[in-house]
Image (cartoon, rainbow, N blue to C red):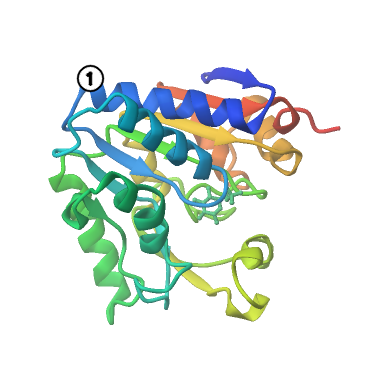
């Protein structure tokens, strides 16, 4: 397996290591283009990163962030939009400027054009230096659901029932969970210069253990990471064992 693995006991420890990893990357390269993930996995990582930056300030004026995905049909102001997530967890506490971030526009009248433009904007930034990733229970990365082509660029996806159920906890009712999203593609993710993958909790164990078997299969999108040469997996013990 071509993945550097850091196993930890607790979610808290995973978050600490991930936040230090990101802090060091910004410290080394203030022009960093950081690919950012949402979901519950990285919440405490952002929290720790904010704390660390407040303790030991670093120059954030040239940092850029690029989101993996966004729901279709949620306005930016919606509390469950990924824009709001970034504002809440990173932009407001660090007083970053909105111009420093890219998030797909899920309200665009022309979603296919939005996808083309998003991909171009990433290219214009010079590509992603460090991509943070979480993983879905079914092995999705970003919102690249099982079966997505490994050659995919930014595209519109139909969310699977299992992903909508997994994300229902953030919404009032399950029917409020959007049915579509825009996500960067697997090819976009694979072009990142380095990747950190965070996984915590036993529900991720099948996805993580499939990755660590070393096979590469579109049925488990996360397994493509076996073909990247700079991946660090930071994982809690219970997310590695399938029992
Ligand atoms: C979400 C996001 C992914 C995230 C994954 C896991 O729906 N689109 O970027 O990595 O699914 O989410 P969580 O961390 O909440 O388990």
x 71%, y 28%: residue: 240
Viewer-nearest residue: 51 or 216: 51
| Residue 24, above or below 73 | above
x 67%, y 39%: residue: 207
x, y (%) of residue 21?
40, 23
| Left or right: 160 as drawn, with respect to 55 | right
Question: Quick one: quadrant of the N terminus?
Answer: top right
x, y (%) of residue 74?
42, 75
Residue 193 lies in what quarter of the image?
A: top left
x, y (%) of residue 88?
40, 56
x 20%, y 62%: residue: 117
Res. 1 visible in picture: no
x, y (%) of residue 229?
41, 21
Viewer-nearest residue: 87 or 157: 87
| Residue 174, above or below 201 | below
x 45%, y 69%: residue: 79
Residue 212 lies in what quarter of the image?
A: top right
SS at circle 1: helix
| Left or right: 234 as drawn, with respect to 34 | right
| Residue 70, above or below 226 | below
The residue tagged 1 is: 28
Viewer-nearest residue: 172 or 145: 172
Res. 175 visible in picture: yes
Viewer-nearest residue: 15 or 121: 15
| Count of all numbered marks drawn on residues in the image | 1
| Left or right: 15 as drawn, with respect to 151 | right
| Residue 116, above or below 152 | below
């Amino acid at each position: 397996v071509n993945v550097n693995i850091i196993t930890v006991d607790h979610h808290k420890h995973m978050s600490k290591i991930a936040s230090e990893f990101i802090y060091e990357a910004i410290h080394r390269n203030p022009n960093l283009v950081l690919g950012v993930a949402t979901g519950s996995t990285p919440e405490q990582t952002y929290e720790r990163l904010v704390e660390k930056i407040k303790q030991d300030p670093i120059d954030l004026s040239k940092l850029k962030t690029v989101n993996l995905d966004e729901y279709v049909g949620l306005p930016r102001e919606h509390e469950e939009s990924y824009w709001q997530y970034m504002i809440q967890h990173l932009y407001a506490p660090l007083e970053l400027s909105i111009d420093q971030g890219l998030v797909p526009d899920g309200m665009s009248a022309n979603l296919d054009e939005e996808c083309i433009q998003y991909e171009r904007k990433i290219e214009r930034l010079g590509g992603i230096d460090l991509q943070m990733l979480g993983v879905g229970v079914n092995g999705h990365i970003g919102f690249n659901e099982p079966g997505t082509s490994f050659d995919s660029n930014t595209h519109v996806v139909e969310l699977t029932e299992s992903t909508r159920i997994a994300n229902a906890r953030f919404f009032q009712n399950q029917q409020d969970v959007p049915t579509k999203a825009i996500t960067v593609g697997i090819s976009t993710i694979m072009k990142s210069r380095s990747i950190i993958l965070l996984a915590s909790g036993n529900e991720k164990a099948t996805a993580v253990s499939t990755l660590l078997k070393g096979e590469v299969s579109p049925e488990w999108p996360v397994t493509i990471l076996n073909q990247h040469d700079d991946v660090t997996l930071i994982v809690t013990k219970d997310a590695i064992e399938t029992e």
